Image (cartoon, rainbow, N blue to C red):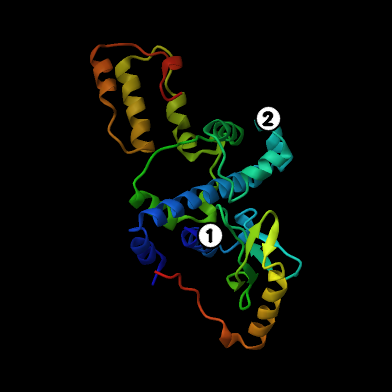
Amino acid sequence: MQQAQLDQKLDQLEQVNDPALLPALLVGTSQIHVYKLRIGGKIRLRPMVCRGTGDPKLEITLLHPAYERDGRLDPQDAPERAEQRRQEILADPSRRKRYEPPD
Amino acid sequence: MNRRTRLLRQFRQKEYREVYVDAFLNSYIAAQIRALREARGLSQSGLAKLIGTKQSGVSKLEDVNYSSWSIRTLKKLARAFEIALVVRFVSFGEALADIEDFNAKALVKPKFAEDQVFRSAEPLLTSVSPGTTAQAQYTSLHHVRSITSRAEPPKHYEHETSLGATYSAAANPLA
């Protein structure tokens, strides 16, 4: 039930307003502004996120889906794709919308 | 839709609520260990020494996705942080309340020496001398209990009082 795991982590991030309080939840990638959101479970979800792009203290943006298996990201270039999307959002903030978990 | 309404809806699915609550527990414990360690001014290595493990072991315990901790380890951590560990089963409704109340401030708990419950009760407790009669000590204890918990004294105090027993300070159940 990956949706429940994802929702839980996003809820908690929203509640604390400080990812540092949730150790090892956001981990850096090859792209300086892109983090992988570590979500446990049999299939390891690693959505690519960034802080902001509005207020970096209060917002996180989900940029690109990804999984991790045996220490390898799938897709392998997920951080680069995420960075590309981040640039697109910076250029056109209207492309971003508030995340609503599906029912 | 706010978080509570969403979770009330989604928790109707058995698997969803089980997975969500499990993930919350893992995150909560990791975050609390980290917050308590930092509040005590301890490094991961420093805490590791106190609980008899390695720095990498503490690092694992502070991982929000780690789920293999044991009650034994948590008890060691409680001793190191000078706080109590309480483990209990609760309804999903109670779990939801904990989820909603999650915040950074709530994670840090005072060590015994800084615990306001005991600090505020100290003058009353130190005024009880050894050999005080049961009635007098009962009154003192009742006073303390009413300050700390606002609860009625348990029945056994009344019973022991009626027997005219004498407590010593060492036998003080709150000491």
Q: Chain of mark 2?
A: B
Say which mark, if any, is on residue A9: 1
Look at the numbered disc 2 and give the secondary structure of its residue.
loop
At horizontal 29% and vertical 21% (from top left) the residue drawn is B157
> Label 2 crowding class (10 Å Cα cut-off): few <14, some 14-19, many 20+?
few
Look at label 1 and name its amino acid: Lys
Question: Which circle, 1 or 2, is nearer the viewer?
Answer: 1
How far apart are the two marked residues, 1 and 2, measured between alpha carbons? 30 Å
At horizontal 46% and vertical 73% (from top left) the residue drawn is A100
Look at label 2 and name its amino acid: Gly
At horizontal 55% and vertical 60% (from top left) the residue drawn is A16
Q: Chain of mark 1?
A: A
B47 to A10, vertically: above or below: above
x, y percentage for residue A27? 68, 60
x, y percentage for residue A78? 68, 70
Q: Is B165 situated left or right of B96 in this image? A: left
Comparing B109 with B164, the one in front is B109
The quadrant holding residue B165 is top left
Q: Which residue is mark 2?
A: B52
Look at the numbered disc 1 and give the secondary structure of its residue.
helix
A42 to A82, vertically: above or below: above
The quadrant holding residue A67 is bottom right
x, y percentage for residue B25? 49, 48
Comparing A37 with B5, the one in front is A37
The quadrant of the rendering that contains the C terminus of chain A is bottom left
Say which mark, if any, is on residue A100: none
Comparing B29 with B66, the one in front is B66
x, y percentage for residue A71? 70, 55
At horizontal 34% and vertical 11% (from top left) the residue drawn is B166
